[in-house]
Amino acid sequence: MSRFKVGLADQLLNARHSPTVLVRANYLTAVASRIDSFWVPDHLNALMPRTIATPQHLGAAKLIPKIDASLEPWTMLGHLAARNRIGRLRLGVGVTDAGRRNPAVTAQAAATLHLMTRGRAILGIGVGEREGNEPYGVDWDKPVARFEEAIATIRALWDSGGELISRDSPYFPLHGAVFDLPPYRGKWPEIWIAAHGPRMLRATGRYADAWFPAFPQRPHEYEQRLGAVRTSASDAGRDPMSITPAIWLFVFTGRTRDDVDEALNSDVAKSFAFNVSAKDWARHGVQHPLGADFSGAQDLIPQTMDEQTALAYTAKVPVSLLKECLLTGTPDEVIEQAAEWRDHGVRYIVVCNLSTLQPSLRKGVAASIPFARILRGLTRL
């Protein structure tokens, strides 16, 4: 059995007094915990309603006054690579948007970071979400088809050897294009694909170095989908065991189980459930307020939701749903839940601390101590 590896993800939000203070604190936590990697997301705005990300509902709003003030990921990773020479963590984007970003620019950004870090860059990539595309004039039609073409384009540029390359594509055609950045010691950044549906799982098997999904799914569903990824890899003539089984999971912890349960029952914590599909809501006996066919985070546009509507929706959220799609509880409880994912095939877990998503700033900040214990415990799985 391969060694279980751990990464830490930051939420990459601009703080009141400094754009780097929170991300640097999390980076140093990752270094101190002796884990493998540090990750940042790629969003133009938050996947929660800004109308309830206020001091009335969210204690952390005192530190992060604008929840939609998302920092640019590649810029921040370049900053970390240049300013933080300790730890030698691998650095990844979890995950960049294949539709909003031209794949040539993504190939350049990832290759640049790879050279800067001496081979420690990871290109996490997926289809993105509607909220980061449609409001900004980016076509959201056929996102999976655009993703497949983006990945093929990145691979074609990296494999071109600096020769002029032309390639037909309905989305990203190349006409005498040149890509002359070199790989680091003959190796390009690993590509980690965030895939969930059948077509994306097949693409993962064809192109990815790691499968890197997030929620919503349960451990046994992960194991089944991992089988589909490996079958696709085998069909493409690749070694199916060469693809790292990874996952991105959110953690909600606290000093006591009572603190955790109190926070999970808050409106702002329950708003996380808007990102979960209607199918998963139905399993808990509740219809998703955005419709019986709502797909979840991929189609959520939360910035248009007013406070009254958001609170009406959070009132419908069963806490059991949050406990299913998050790792929740004390450190021992969270580590036990993570072990179940390991037992269903996960070999690399990236965790993001969501514990500040509650009304109490004091308890949200205090949760950083049990979260650090969780990081150390995960490295021993």
Image (cartoon, rainbow, N blue to C red):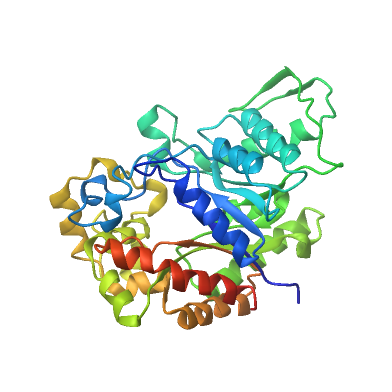
Whether residue 203 can be seen here: no
Q: Position of residue 130 (x, y in %)?
A: 40, 41
Is residue 75 or residue 319 the one in the foreground?
75
Hey, which quadrant is residue 13 in on the image?
top left
Is residue 69 or residue 127 the one in the foreground?
69
Q: Residue at x 44, y 40 (%)?
A: 19
Q: Position of residue 241 (x, y in %)?
A: 77, 65
In the displayed structure, 47 sits above or below 100; it is below
Is residue 116 or residue 309 the one in the foreground?
116
Q: Position of residue 35 (x, y in %)?
A: 64, 64
Q: Position of residue 288 (x, y in %)?
A: 27, 61
Is residue 236 toward the left or the right of residue 78 in the image?
right
Hey, which quadrant is residue 366 in on the image?
bottom left
Is residue 103 toward the left or the right of residue 16 in the image?
right
Quadrant in which the C terminus is drawn: bottom right
Hey, which quadrant is residue 355 in on the image?
bottom left
Is residue 134 toward the left or the right of residue 268 in the image?
right
Q: Residue at x 59, y 38 (%)?
A: 79
Is residue 145 or residue 266 the one in the foreground?
266
Quadrant in which the N terminus is drawn: bottom right
In the displayed structure, 124 sits above or below 240; it is above
In the displayed structure, 376 sits above or below 186; it is below
Q: Residue at x 16, y 51 (%)?
A: 309
